[in-house]
Amino acid sequence: MGPASPVLVLNQNYEPLNVCTVRRAFVLVDRGKAEILENGRGYLHTASQLFEMPSVIRLVYLIRRPRPNGRLTRRDVFLRDGFTCQYCGKPTKELTLDHVLPRHRDGAHDWENVVAACKGCNHRKAGHTPHEAHMALMHRPVRPRVTTAYLVLPYVESQSSWEKFLSGWL
Ligand SMILES: [Zn+2]
């Protein structure tokens, strides 16, 4: 457990909002924007001080739900696609990102043009469109709705201290 460990962020009304890092949580607490609800991470020692490392924080003011963030990572795409190749349907951890319309042909790096593909399918498709490569997508790629469940579920199994704050919300 360290500064990059995940922290559950609750809205002022206790609605689960987001997941941030211990480092980010420190900043929010330090600026008086959040309070620590659960100190599940032990303590961080510095030369002169002892800091509680939170696992759950609550904002002191009510915020409107955050807009879906625009950043698109490999993990986001693999999660959306259920860690399954979108061409052959094989579930695998050995996934690559495939641009449906290849980048060198002005394919965008966005939710609608990026899918998870296994190495075999990515190799076979190479620099072609699915049509040219005689391959078909299982689903049309879309931008996922960002829900709390989508943000939080990947962590739930490993974060038992979050359970009581999530029950009834997901
Ligand atoms: Zn495949």
Image (cartoon, rainbow, N blue to C red):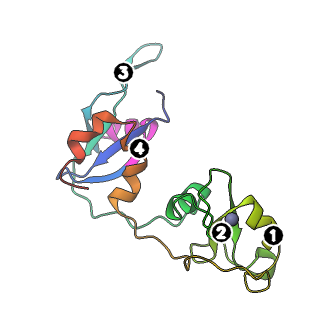
Q: Is mark 2 within 8 Å of ligand 1?
A: yes
The reply, left or right, for residue 58 in relation to residue 136 is left
Q: Nearer the viewer, residue 53 or 50?
A: 53
Occupied quadrant, residue 148? bottom left
State which mark lies toward you, 1 or 2.
Answer: 2
Dot 3: few (<14), some (14–19), or many (≥20) neighbours within 10 Å?
A: some
Q: Is mark 1 within 8 Å of ligand 1?
A: no
The reply to whether the C-beta atoms of the residues labelled 2 and 3 are less than 8 Å apart is no
Quadrant observed for ligand 1 in the rendered image:
bottom right
Check disc 2 and report the residue beneath it. 88
Check disc 1 and report the residue beneath it. 124
What amino acid is at disc 2?
Answer: Cys
Q: CA distance from mark 2 to mark 3?
A: 45 Å
Q: Which mark is residue 42?
A: 3
Q: Residue at x 25, y 44 (%)?
A: 58
Q: CA distance from mark 1 to mark 2?
A: 11 Å
State which mark lies toward you, 4 or 3.
Answer: 4
Q: Earlier in the sequence, mark 4 or mark 3?
A: 3
The reply to whether the C-beta atoms of the residues labelled 4 and 2 are less than 8 Å apart is no
Secondary element type, mark 3: loop
What amino acid is at disc 1?
Answer: Arg
State which mark lies toward you, 4 or 1.
Answer: 1
Q: Which residues are magenta?
A: 19-31
